């Protein structure tokens, strides 16, 4: 099933067919040993200590992290991969070295002055903002 999903994605987006290699040497500011394994990304999710807008900074709130730039390939959005990515990022955020207490997730906003141009460049429509806070009690 995994091979079939990757093939579906790379057929729809041939420019993304070249695998990447895990070379990351740090996570959360702490060293890690890269696996050197190859993988074909079918999406992206970021866990950030700072938000792109300074007025929403979390510097005064230790343990607050932002889930950002969350994307799953359009051709694979019906297979539960988004939910699996969220589960994984929540689990990673709870553990060392981050020890998150709250995760925040924001979505598109029509009142963002830069949004219309950004989404037009991507060929997408903008929509109303929502902000979700996930309190991590299980950490």
Image (cartoon, helix red, strand yellow):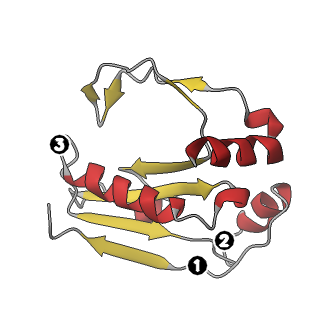
Name above or below for residue 54 compared with residue 111: above
Q: Counting other residues with Cα less than 10 Å from the Cα at mark 2, is it few (<14), some (14-19), or many (20 or more)?
A: few
Q: How far apart are marks 3 and 2 (CA)?
A: 34 Å
Q: Is mark 2 on a helix, strand or loop?
A: loop
Residue at the (66%, 58%) spot, across then down: 76
The residue mark sitting in front, 3 or 2, is: 3
| Image quadrant assignment for residue 138 | bottom left
Answer yes or no: do the residues labelled 2 and 1 have beta carbons within 8 Å? yes
Q: Where is residue 125 in the image (x, y as percent from the top left)?
A: 79, 72
Q: Which of marks 3 and 1 is in front?
A: 3
| Label 3: which secondary element | loop
Closer to the camera in the image, 64 or 137:
137
Residue position marked by numbered label 2 in the rendering? 112
User: Residue under circle 3?
Assistant: 96
Which mark's residue is nearer the viewer, 2 or 1?
Answer: 1
Residue 121 vertical position relative to residue 11 in the rendered view, above or below? below
Give the Cα distance between marks 2 and 1. 9 Å
84 vs 108, nearest the viewer: 84
Q: Do the numbered discs 3 and 1 sit on residues whose CB atoms are within 8 Å? A: no
Label 1 sits on residue: 129
Q: Which of 17 and 122 is in front in this view?
A: 17
């Amino acid at each position: 099933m995994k091979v079939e999903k990757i093939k579906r994605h790379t057929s729809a987006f041939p420019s993304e067919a070249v695998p990447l290699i895990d070379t990351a040497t740090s996570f959360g500011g702490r060293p890690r040993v890269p696996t050197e394994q190859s993988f074909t990304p079918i999406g992206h999710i970021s866990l950030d200590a700072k938000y792109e807008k300074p007025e929403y900074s979390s510097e005064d709130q230790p343990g607050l992290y932002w889930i950002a730039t969350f994307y799953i390939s359009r051709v694979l959005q019906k297979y539960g991969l988004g939910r699996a990515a969220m589960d994984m990022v929540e689990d990673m955020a709870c553990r060392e070295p981050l020890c998150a207490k709250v995760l925040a997730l924001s979505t598109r906003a029509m009142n963002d002055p830069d949004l219309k141009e950004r989404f037009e460049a991507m060929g997408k429509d903008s929509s109303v903002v929502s902000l979700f806070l996930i309190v991590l009690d299980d950490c």
